[in-house]
Amino acid sequence: MGDKRKKDIKDTIVSFLFFAVVFGVVWSLYYFFSRDDSAGNYKYCTLEHVDVHDRGGLVSGNTDYKRVADFKTKECGNLYMTDSPDPGRSMDDYVGSLEVGGYYKVTLLNVQMPDAKTVSVTRFEKAERPS
């Protein structure tokens, strides 16, 4: 009876560790791809309007208060940002540093959502207007 119990405990621990590793890998891939801009895809856009708001919706029965930003631009249409590119700054502070009417090089995420109306971006860099 003792050997069977030890085997059951061992199988349970091995199963738990396997699922924990799989979960960790899946979560890491999600985190990487949701912030990956390594392909260097970018556009040049004139910023016309910025709206920072809570993402909203329910997550596990709780309201999601994460701050996100919607941008309207002249050349690029609607843009969307979920994380401030500066880890020490809030989304409100980062967006507050951008100038409406300013011309920016906008870095795009490698993986875009299938919604063609909005493009996900990771950062804005001040750029010179072409003459």
Image (cartoon, rainbow, N blue to C red):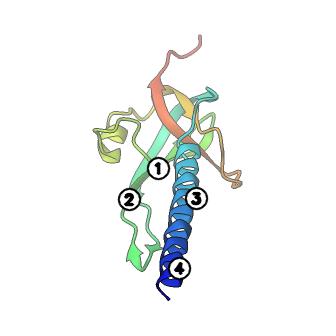
- C-alpha distance separating marks 3 and 4: 21 Å
As helix, strand or loop, the secondary structure at mark 3 comes to helix
Mark nearer the N terminus (1 vs 4): 4
- C-alpha distance separating marks 2 and 4: 43 Å
In front of the other: 8 or 67? 8
Mark nearer the N terminus (3 vs 4): 4
Q: Which mark is residue 82?
A: 1
The amino acid marked with disc number 4 is Asp
Which residue matches tag 4?
8
Mark nearer the N terminus (1 vs 2): 2
Query: How far across and how far down the image is residue 25, in percent?
Result: 56, 52
As helix, strand or loop, the secondary structure at mark 4 comes to helix
Alpha-carbon neighbours of circle 4 within 10 Å: few (<14), some, or many (≥20)? Answer: few
As helix, strand or loop, the secondary structure at mark 1 comes to loop
Alpha-carbon neighbours of circle 2 within 10 Å: few (<14), some, or many (≥20)? Answer: few
Mark nearer the N terminus (3 vs 1): 3
Which residue matches tag 3?
22
- C-alpha distance separating marks 1 and 4: 44 Å
The amino acid marked with disc number 3 is Val
96 relative to 28, above or below? above
67 relative to 46, above or below? below
Front label number (3 vs 2): 3
38 relative to 59, above or below? above
Left or right relative to 56: residue 96: left
87 relative to 20, above or below? above
Query: How far across and how far down the image is residue 82, in percent?
Result: 47, 49
Q: Quadrant of the C terminus?
A: top right
- C-alpha distance separating marks 3 and 1: 26 Å
The answer to the question of whether label 1 and label 2 lie on touching residues, with beta carbons closer than 8 A, is yes
Which residue matches tag 2?
66
